[in-house]
């Protein structure tokens, strides 16, 4: 993959580039760290320019750099035009101001903005706001573009995916790609969805299609590297990470992952078993928003800070029912979702209680071993830090945790898990299992 050597699109030229050109410029800027730095410096040089035109151009530039609040302030000072209202809407959406976003998108139509693109941006905005009925309404208004517009099918698929209609979403992602083979967002979501469904071969194929082009699609490369690592193809995983670091040398996730891959090459592990654990972790980390629940159930769970499926394993039926407006109907909805995955409310709490009961039968010799501090074990810095973040201080604390709980910790990967398992297994100990 070659880096785009030069970009002829100049946002600060006398004539404002088209919206399509601005989109290509944004892709070029994020194709490498050096491009981002150069563009940021150019933006700073233009920050002091006055007048409506300068406000529009600098506002768009700040939005490209994800400096949304500054972008909105600048764009409000620009002369009314479709570009002002479209980019102002995008900035407001990034700030979570969805009502204002819709108002500005509507204003853009009064200044000759493309109707289809605008309505699809409205649909996306309502989806971010979790107003799915409004998304339906906007998409129905665009229904005459079925089998014509790739973006229409992409937005329809995103709604279906959010509601848990995964098969329908996959079908619409594929239609989007038939209409526009280079639709990167559709390719990425299709790859991601196949990955979650356990279809690794299809996921790898879609990710490879993304990273074969230019500019560098960092998230696709990172996800492809994870898949290769799970498959034991460490050299291929390393090549993906090296490509990220070639253009983004200070990318922290890539730097950490490269170290993880390097250590994986020298550590034995059961590939099939680890694949199973990885899939299990993905299930536990599935967002609640992916499931088709009533608005009441969804709102109650959001207020209770229950964001992913795994959170429900740490709460009992009684605790749910004690929450305001949460009734038997909502409870049955949630239990049904968990049953489909072979899970149940409070099962992690039950495991912890069982662990306590087992611990009561430990001998004094066992107690001495279980009280051994984690810091005394020969572990890598990453593994030790992750355990510390989980408040795991002793071997006893560690044996009461499941592998899924460790894998749920940020920056904690399969390599670190295997490192820990190897150490505790050598001491005749093992971690808790939910199997």
Image (tube, rainbow, N blue to C red):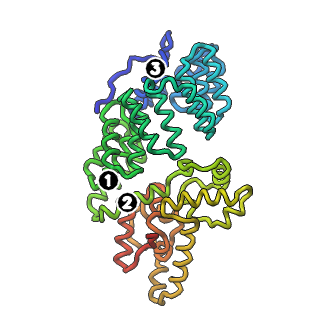
> Residue tagged by mark 3?
20
Q: Quickly name the residue at label 2.
A: 414
> Between marks 2 and 1, how big is the CA–CA gap?
9 Å
Whether the residues at callouts 2 and 1 have beta carbons within 8 Å, the answer is yes
> Disc 2 on helix, strand or loop?
helix
Q: Is residue 331 visible?
A: yes
* Distance in Å between CA atoms under marks 2 and 3: 41 Å
Label 3 neighbour load within 10 Å: few <14, some 14-19, many 20+: few
Res 178 quadrant in image: top left
How far from the left and from the top, in percent, is residue 125? Answer: 59, 33
Name the residue carrying label 1. Answer: 229
| Mark earlier in primary sequence (2, 1) | 1
Residue 427 in the image: x percent, y percent? 37, 79
Q: CA distance from mark 1 to mark 3?
A: 36 Å
Q: Residues within 10 Å of mark 1 (few under 14, many from 20)?
A: many
Q: Residue at x 46, y 40 (%)?
A: 169
Name of the residue lying farthest toward the bottom: 364
**Image side of residue 204 versus residue 389, left or right:** left
Mark 1 lies on a secondary structure that is: helix
Please give the name of the residue rendered at 54% of the width and 25% of the height, measured from the top-left corner: 142
Point out residue 84 in the picture as x, y percentages from the top left corner.
60, 19
Left or right, 116 with respect to 422, comes to right
Q: Pick whichever, 276 or 397, lies toward us.
A: 276
């Amino acid at each position: 993959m070659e880096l785009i050597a030069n970009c002829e699109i100049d946002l600060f030229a006398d004539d404002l580039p088209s919206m399509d050109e601005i989109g290509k410029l944004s892709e070029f800027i994020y194709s490498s760290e050096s491009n981002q730095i150069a563009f940021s410096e150019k933006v700073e040089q233009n920050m002091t320019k006055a007048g409506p035109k300068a406000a529009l151009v600098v506002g768009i530039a700040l939005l490209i750099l994800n400096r949304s609040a500054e972008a909105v302030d600048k764009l409000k000072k620009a002369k009314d035009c479709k570009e002002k209202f479209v980019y102002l809407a995008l900035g407001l959406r990034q700030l979570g101001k969805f009502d204002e976003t819709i108002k500005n998108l509507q204003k853009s139509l009064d200044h000759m903005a493309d109707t289809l693109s605008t309505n699809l941006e409205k649909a996306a905005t309502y989806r971010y706001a979790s107003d799915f009925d409004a998304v339906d309404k906007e998409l129905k208004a665009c229904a005459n573009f079925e089998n014509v517009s790739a973006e229409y099918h992409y937005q329809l698929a995103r709604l279906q995916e959010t509601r848990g209609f995964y098969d329908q979403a996959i079908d619409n992602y594929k239609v989007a790609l038939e209409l526009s083979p280079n639709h990167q967002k559709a390719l990425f979501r299709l790859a991601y969805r196949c990955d979650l469904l356990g279809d690794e071969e299809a996921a790898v194929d879609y990710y490879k299609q993304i990273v074969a082009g230019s500019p560098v699609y960092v998230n696709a490369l990172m996800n492809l590297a994870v898949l290769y690592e799970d498959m034991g193809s460490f050299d291929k995983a390393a090549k993906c990470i090296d490509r990220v670091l070639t253009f983004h040398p200070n990318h922290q996730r890539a730097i950490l992952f490269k170290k993880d891959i390097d250590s994986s090459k020298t550590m034995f592990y059961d590939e099939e078993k680890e694949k199973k654990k990885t899939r299990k972790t993905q299930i536990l980390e599935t967002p609640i928003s992916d499931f088709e629940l009533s608005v009441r159930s969804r709102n109650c769970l959001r207020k209770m800070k229950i964001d992913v499926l795994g959170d429900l394993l740490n709460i009992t039926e009684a605790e749910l029912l004690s929450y305001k407006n949460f009734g038997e109907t909502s409870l049955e909805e949630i239990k049904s979702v968990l049953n489909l995955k072979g899970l149940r409310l409070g099962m992690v709490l039950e495991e912890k209680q069982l662990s306590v009961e087992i611990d009561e039968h430990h001998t004094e010799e066992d107690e001495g071993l279980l009280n051994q501090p984690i810091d005394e074990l020969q572990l890598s810095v990453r593994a030790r830090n992750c355990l510390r973040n989980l408040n795991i201080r002793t071997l006893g604390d560690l044996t009461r945790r499941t592998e899924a709980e460790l894998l749920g910790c940020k920056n904690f990967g399969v390599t670190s898990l295997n490192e820990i398992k190897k150490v505790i297994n050598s001491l005749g100990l093992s971690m808790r299992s939910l199997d």
